[in-house]
Amino acid sequence: MKFILSFLLLFQCSLFADKVVVKDGSVLMGRVVNSVDGNLTIETDFAGKLRIPLSQISSISSDAAISLRLDDNRTFNQIATPAAGGRVGLEGNDLSFDFAQIRHIWSPDSDDPLVLIEKQKQKALLMQWSHALGFDFTGSSGNTRDFGLGLRADSSYGNKSREYDLYLAYNNSSKNDVTVVDETKLGVEYDSKFYERLAWYAKTDLENDRLEEIDLRATAAVGLKYFWIKNNSYDLSARSGVAFRLEEYQSSSNPTLSEPALDFGLEYSRKIRSFLSLEGDLTYVPSVNDFADFLLSNDIALVVPLDKKENWNIRSGINGTYNSTPATDKDELDLKYYLRLVYRLN
């Protein structure tokens, strides 16, 4: 008896189901969900939801009425049937259409794609918070005793048109019980798009470095940002603006620096594989009075996600600052290598 019931249920499911035939001869049975941006979504029992380009479909038939909208906005709500010439027909209607004429398809229990598009636009305008915490730990023992601690917190608040970014970082390293790195950094940036690829920005970076005897190194800048390349796997943006530099030292032998400057930068990210990404930020701040007096900073890292949602990831990179006019008895280049465990709170 159970076998007969199971057979009848399977027979009923196969009898009452939408059918999509692909040009390569494949036949998909399931429920047509919708068609947006030239792709049809069908939900199947064996593979879940599948997306198929309409250009690759040879016929569609439905077991119940579905909604269909053409490019000229004519809308029908009828059972779909295969028609001659690889077209879509409507039951009880002499009309038939090429797949190229179809703008949207959706089932009765799905939202109108135009409504979904409007909801997505509204969602994109919502300002949302995103946070991340990073931890760096390094150490060794034996002939040389090294210990390093790094903490970084990042927060962003924005939507697709404007965004606030904030970060706070602290690094401390010692070698044979002698401190070799002891610095704190704080940064805030705001950018707002006023055109599809163009935005204006304002940013400031503050730094205290006790080993370099810097009480305060501050850079404030305002200018334009151009989103050069932006797609699913590669982002590249460039910025240019005017800036102001301030450096105050602990020692009176180093005069306070206070001068106008320019701000140039590149921000980039590339998804190399599903398990590996490259991210970087390059900033060049030359003095207006003397281009030989400049500050160059860069952070470039490889990022490896540790889970499917990418909440946890490992960031391995190089962070460096080159100061063409360093404090007395200090090196121009301050370079750090790090391995950071990052947790994202979205």
Image: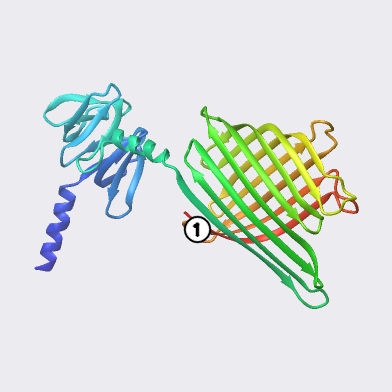
For the N terminus, the quadrant is bottom left
User: Percent from the top left, x then y, of residue 131?
Assistant: 52, 54
Q: Position of residue 237 (x, y in %)?
A: 61, 36
Q: Is residue 212 above or below residue 21?
A: below
Nearest the camera: 138 or 213?
213
Q: Nearer the viewer, residue 105 or 1?
A: 105
Residue that protrudes farthest toward the bottom in the picture: 142
Where residue 169 appears, as percent x and y from the top left, is: 65, 56
Which quadrant of the figure has residue 219?
top right
Residue closest to the far top: 72
Q: Position of residue 122 (x, y in %)?
A: 37, 37
Q: Nearer the viewer, residue 203 or 195?
A: 203
Left or right of residue 333: residue 109? left
Q: Relative to 64, is 188 on the left or the right?
A: right
Q: Secondary structure at mark 1?
A: loop
Residue for badge 1: 311
Count the marks: how many? Answer: 1
Horizontal arrangement in the rendering, residue 145 relative to residue 73 (left or right): right
Image colouring: rainbow
